[in-house]
Image: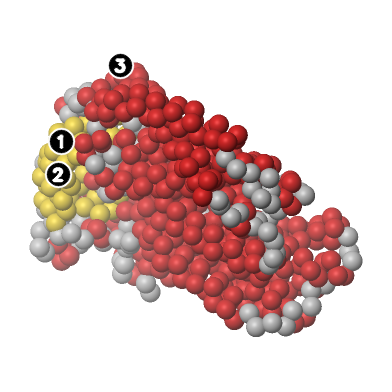
Amino acid sequence: MSAFFILIGRDLQLSIRHRADTIMVAGFFAITVILFPFGIGPEPGVLERVGAGILWVTALLASLLSLDHLFSDDEQDGALDLLLTAPVAPTTVVAAKIAAHWLTTGLPLTLLAPILGVALQMPSESTVPMITALLIGTPTLSLIGAVGAALTLGARRRGILLPLVILPLYIPILIFGVGAIDTSGMGFEAGGLFAVLGGFLLIALALCPWAAAVSLRVATE
Amino acid sequence: MHAFANPTRFLKLAAAIQPWAVGLCIICFAVGLPMALVFSPPDYQQGDTVRIMYIHVPSAWMGLFAYGVMAAGSASYLIWRHPVANMVARASAPIGAMFTALCLLTGMLWGEPMWGTPWVWDARLTSMLVLFFLYLGYMALGDAFDRPEQGDKAAAILALVGSVNLPIIKFSVDWWNSLHQPSIFSMAGVSVDTAMLPPLFLMVGAFQFYYVVVVLMRVRAHVLAAKVRAARLMRAA
Amino acid sequence: MSDRMQPPTALNVSGLSARRGGRTIFEGLSLSLTDGHALVVTGPNGSGKSTLLRVLAGLLRSEAGTVVIDPEDDSDICYAGHRDGLKGSLTVQENLAFWAKLYGADLGAVDVAINRMALETVLDMPADMLSAGWRRRAGLSRLALGTSSIWILDEPYTALDAENVIRIDSLLSEHVAAGGIVVLATHQAPGFNPTHQINMADYPAETSEMDW
């Protein structure tokens, strides 16, 4: 078994021990989405129009929550030093932790979204585009988020700093994620928008593990 | 490059440049400001409102320019570990953020008579707004660590990440804007009369020299503060 | 262990200096270690023992000088710092099994390591529930997996009782006898004869910060 999968296995094993964390993220996602009908009124036309935006914005915030301890748990108990000195490339360590983060955050959110979409009275035609957009988009959130988590490791007031650093970088995914759902919900061809989301994912895949690994080095120095 | 990497030599160089930059800055303002605000022709559609452009456009330019300097300085700091490059990058951020804020503010003042509302999600203004938040994140990250070196390096990496992201953000915002507001009157649509160009260039020059003056002052202060800190550490050790 | 060690491993350090917290900690440190060498690093608080070890382990960039490890294969290093890197919610067995898999140790190695550190009684306990001394033992059991030839240990004796200090000492001396390399930072004299010894106080930073 390659180091990448060993590392994913360990992070998954840990998140099964701390399954409350994943449940809390999903719970945060659900309760925050549910707040919007109270905030803007339950008129079907309005909710339907803003539903995709609500889901995406809330998904961004929810994925941010668990980034907080993506590296800091390992940093605090000293495991990060050991991982970085182990016979594994730091980018592999980072990539595996990102993959585990997505499996425990992005994936559950993606699976939960269609149910919340019903609550937001989104048209049933947008269910498949919604899942597809989240499936392509949420890994990019984990990738960019990992860079932010690594950069802010050991910072003061990290809980506020992390969103400030990361959220501006999330904007393109938000724009095209919502665009893809809305465009296909209205019955238009949205293949190009999914392709753009895919392009973002590829760019992030190429750059983020490397940038996060460099940032981790800075943090452990 | 290496010639400027040494802070002491940089201080000497800065001291030589500083008076010239101050002088040029004053001259550009002294000539450009009256030209822009009084003597240049009003726009045939917008009247005197167009004079906001002489602040707005150079601010926007400086907001982007300072980010470019920040990214270049950060790269040179990370690759060659030039302390001065880092200080220039760190010093550029608040100035760039201020110019970006000025650009947004004048954009709102301009928007009021033009659109009847101070804020419209115009593609350019929106991109500048995101740029402002990139600056905020950079400055907050740089100051968030007990070890100053960690803040310097983390902020430098963030500046590079941001510079990769900026074109993507620009592209996304442009697309988003075209989707939602296909036919809004854009600020880019001002037809610039040739008589407007000299004051515009003078204002760009004034802002540019102002930037040089302030960066040099900030870097100087930073070098001196670092020397004080080093001296304290030496005594403690 | 020994069959992994051809060609001989070497750790060469020359002109090393390191900065931490904006200050140069030590300067001009050179040493050369090869198979069967044990280096003990001593020195007063703040003289840079941990910093040196972190540079050697590749966690910290040196300010000047070089660290060359031959053959250039970082699978050869096993670093043990102040913190044990144990996951509190995993059992000792699970913790050790993870490192064994990551370091590519064979299956039997885990049992050997457990036996060496006498961890049998705590295997199924979550690492959170262990006392400091037991945690240390569980953390150091990574060494006994036998996958790495260069061991870099920062104060391994902390929290250990006399019996376990001896246990670690014999583990270290066996490793050296089998041709391994040990770099050990410690306050107390180890129970074996190191081949090399340096005092960090001999490498004070002399470059004035004001120079730049």
Label 2 Cα neighbours within 10 Å, binned few <14 / some 14-19 / many ≥20: some
Left or right of A220 in this view: A12: right
Q: How far is the residue under mark 2 from the one under mark 1?
A: 7 Å
User: Chain under label 3?
Assistant: B
Identity of the amino acid at label 3? Arg
Note whether A201 is above or below B57 in the view shown.
Answer: below
Give the mark toward the camera: 2 or 3: 3
Instruction: Please state which of residues A86 and C63 is positioned toward the viewer in this rendering.
Output: C63
Do callouts 2 and 1 mark residues in contact (Cβ within 8 Å)? Answer: yes
Left or right of A119 in this view: B181: left
Residue C18: x %, y % from top left: 25, 36
Check disc 2 and report the residue beneath it.
Answer: C13
Residue A151: x %, y % from top left: 46, 48
Instruction: Please state which of residues B84 and A77 is positioned toward the viewer in this rendering.
Output: B84
Q: Residue at 88% x, 60% y: name it.
A: A41
Label 3 Cα neighbours within 10 Å, binned few <14 / some 14-19 / many ≥20: few
Is residue C177 visible to the viewer in this orientation of the structure? no
Instruction: Please state which of residues B46 and C72 is positioned toward the viewer in this rendering.
Output: B46
Left or right of B232 in this view: B50: right
- Quadrant of the rendered image containing residue C199: top left
The tag on residue B235 is 3
Residue B55: x %, y % from top left: 57, 40
Left or right of C20 in this view: A186: right
Check disc 1 and report the residue beneath it.
Answer: C29
